[in-house]
Image (cartoon, rainbow, N blue to C red):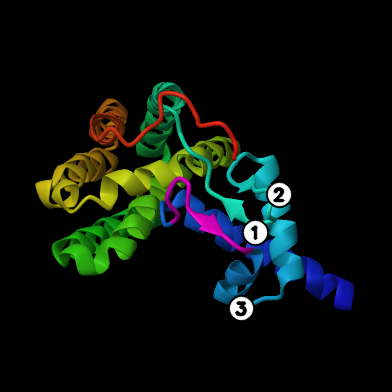
Amino acid sequence: MGQLERVTLGERAYLKLRQLIMSGKLAPNEKLSLRSVAEALGVSIMPVREAVTRLVAEGALSLLPNRAISVPLMTRAKFEELLRIRTEIEGFAAAEAAAHRTSRDLKLILDYDKDFRDAVGKGDSEVDSSLQLNKELHFAVYEAAGSPILVSIIEGLWLKVGPVINLDLRASQRLASGNAETHHARLVEAIINQDGNAARAAVVADIRSSGEFILGSNQLWTNLPEPA
């Protein structure tokens, strides 16, 4: 029973850390200790160590020489490559969602869209909620496609790009511009109307708008620095 509980805690720690990364709540180059993560998650160090090992293997975290962990930096070239891949795969997922969504899927999408708008309307005080709800809305759409394999592929992409999304949605002027809300509104309308082409176009426009903002912010690396 003890072994089973330890494995369960390890999986729980992995899923929580994974969600933080995908939602953009950890920034590039942010450094964490195993102890601080364990305290934040309310578990012992052992399950956190297991979770971190898995996320390092997936390229979502980096292990530092002093046994601390960090969120990897992102180069412009890698980010641009991820943008190209995301527009194709997430655009396809949105089109599939429009074709296959159920009434239950639609209700969930509408709820997340409303919650996202409410959080954005509260400004800087709800930035963390905006980050989380942006991710939840996107994945409610992708899961409506009815393809677990497709969702798994997209999760892998967001593990890599999530911390950089942090640079976009944490910029107060970016949220205030309403760009994300506009693209989301078009996406939701397309899902309601079961218009696959419009759903694809809305997701692609959202990804590209975010990408252009991040590329223009000059916060990405041309070449990664040498390890200290």
Number of residues whose C-alpha sits closer than 10 Å to that of mark 2, classed few (under 14), some (14–19) or many (20 or more):
some
Measured in 3D between alpha carbons, the distance from the residue under mark 2 to the one under mark 1, in whole angstroms, is 8 Å
Q: Amino acid at mark 3?
A: Gly
Image coords of residue 117 (percent x, y) = 19, 59
Task: Identify the mark at residue 14; answer none if there is no mark.
Answer: 1
Secondary structure category for the residue under label 1: helix
The region drawn magenta spans 26-33
User: Residue at 69% across / 48% down in the picture?
Assistant: 65
Write down the residue under mark 2. Answer: 54
**Majority SS type along the magenta span:** loop
Measured in 3D between alpha carbons, the distance from the residue under mark 3 to the one under mark 1, in whole angstroms, is 13 Å
Q: Is residue 102 visible?
A: no
Q: Quadrant of residue 228?
A: top right
201 and 147: which one is in front? 201
| 209 shown above or below 138 | above
Image coords of residue 217 (percent x, y) = 24, 35
Image coords of residue 169 (percent x, y) = 27, 49
Secondary structure category for the residue under label 2: helix
Q: Is residue 221 visible?
A: yes
Q: Please report whichever mark, 3 or 1, sits nearer to the chain's N-terminal start.
A: 1
Q: Amino acid at mark 1?
A: Tyr
Write down the residue under mark 3. Answer: 42
Q: Please report whichever mark, 3 or 2, sits nearer to the chain's N-terminal start.
A: 3
77 part of magenta stretch: no
Measured in 3D between alpha carbons, the distance from the residue under mark 3 to the one under mark 2, in whole angstroms, is 19 Å
Q: Please report whichever mark, 2 or 1, sits nearer to the chain's N-terminal start.
A: 1
| 86 shown above or below 152 | above
User: Residue at 43% across / 33% down in the picture?
Assistant: 93
CB-based contact (under 8 Å), mark 2 and mark 1: yes
Answer left or right for 161 relative to 122: right
CB-based contact (under 8 Å), mark 3 and mark 2: no
